Amino acid sequence: MDRGRRPAFLGTLAVRWSTLGGNTRGALLMVVNALIFSIMVALIKTSAERVPIVMVMFVSVATQFFFVSLRNVALFGRTLLRSERRGLHLLRVVLLVGSMYAGFSAVVLLPLAEATAISFSKAFFVTLFAALLLREPVGPRRLLAVVVGFAGILILTRPSGDSDIPLAGAILGMVSAAAAAGGTIGTRILAQRDSAAVLLLYQAAFGSLMLLPIAFFHLHVPDLGTIGILVLIGLLSVIGNTSM
């Protein structure tokens, strides 16, 4: 009986979802992204105590690559070889991998709450880059909200050096947010022609290739529990990146 109801229930959800405006759906998806990110931060901090941060990154991205390529195996070869704007795809991957490294390092150096709070400065950089690069209009209310939020992050980090949190961690968190914002702008531009599957394929495939030699020189075989956490981080990354 339940099996018969599920398709109808999912169909109803799909219909309701399609009736929502683009801004509403986008906002809800970004809430999902933020939730996934918060869970990932906690898992990253736990696993980084057991293995080098580069190994955390590599297993995470390689897990993404496995599941994304498996799900889109028919697209894989054709997409990577024939897709247009490969240069922009690669620039986006470099920004996202750089953001990941800086962000993971910040999570290791900072208390969890502070690292998560600083990561929200991404909204400031996205708004700034969208206005400068995409010429998107930024109304006074949105600008005020972003400025107030960014001011709060500055108060938290206290650039004068009076803060009780490591300055290096705060700087890495800001660098991660700025690089992630650049990757988001690249996603926005590329998504006008390429599907989410294509974007994830590039991100996972070339991200794995970039991290492989670095991870090799930091090779550390973790225990099964840690491997499970790293794989879970990769799976959450797939969900989070797809929602973005």
Image (cartoon, helix red, strand yellow):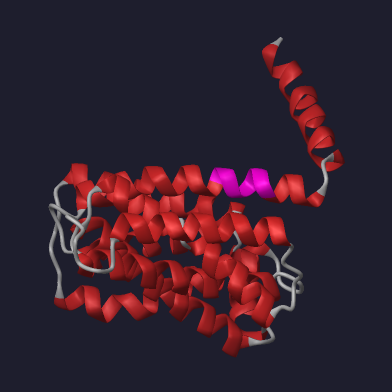
Determine if the magenta segment contains residue 101: no
Q: Quadrant of the rendered structure where residue 123 is?
A: bottom right
Q: Main secondary structure of the magenta part?
A: helix
Q: Quadrant of the C terminus?
A: bottom right
Q: Which residues are magenta?
A: 27-32
Q: Residue at x 42, y 54 (%)?
A: 152
With 174 as the anchor, is 25 left or right in this view? right
With 216 as the anchor, is 101 left or right in this view? right
User: In the rendered image, is residue 174 in sight?
Assistant: yes
Residue 136: % across, % down: 75, 72
Residue 115: % across, % down: 31, 54
Q: Quadrant of the rendered structure where residue 7 is?
A: top right
Image label count: 0
Q: Residue at x 80, y 23 (%)?
A: 8
* Of residues 223 and 141, the one drawn nearer to the viewer in this rendering: 141
With 164 as the anchor, is 26 left or right in this view? right
Q: Is 186 placed above or below 47 here?
A: below
* Of residues 85 and 70, the one drawn nearer to the viewer in this rendering: 85
With 148 as the anchor, is 227 left or right in this view? left
Determine if the magenta segment contains residue 31: yes
Residue 198: % across, % down: 63, 69
* Of residues 144 and 66, the one drawn nearer to the viewer in this rendering: 144
Q: Is 93 placed above or below 38 here?
A: below
Q: Is 6 placed above or below 122 here?
A: above
User: Please, which residue is most extreme toward the bottom here?
Assistant: 87
Q: Is 7 placed above or below 31 here?
A: above
Q: Quadrant of the N terminus?
A: top right
Q: Residue at x 23, y 50 (%)?
A: 45
User: In the rendered image, is residue 58 in sight?
Assistant: no
Q: Residue at x 54, y 61 (%)?
A: 147
Q: Quadrant of the rendered structure where residue 173 is?
A: bottom left
Residue 3: % across, % down: 69, 18
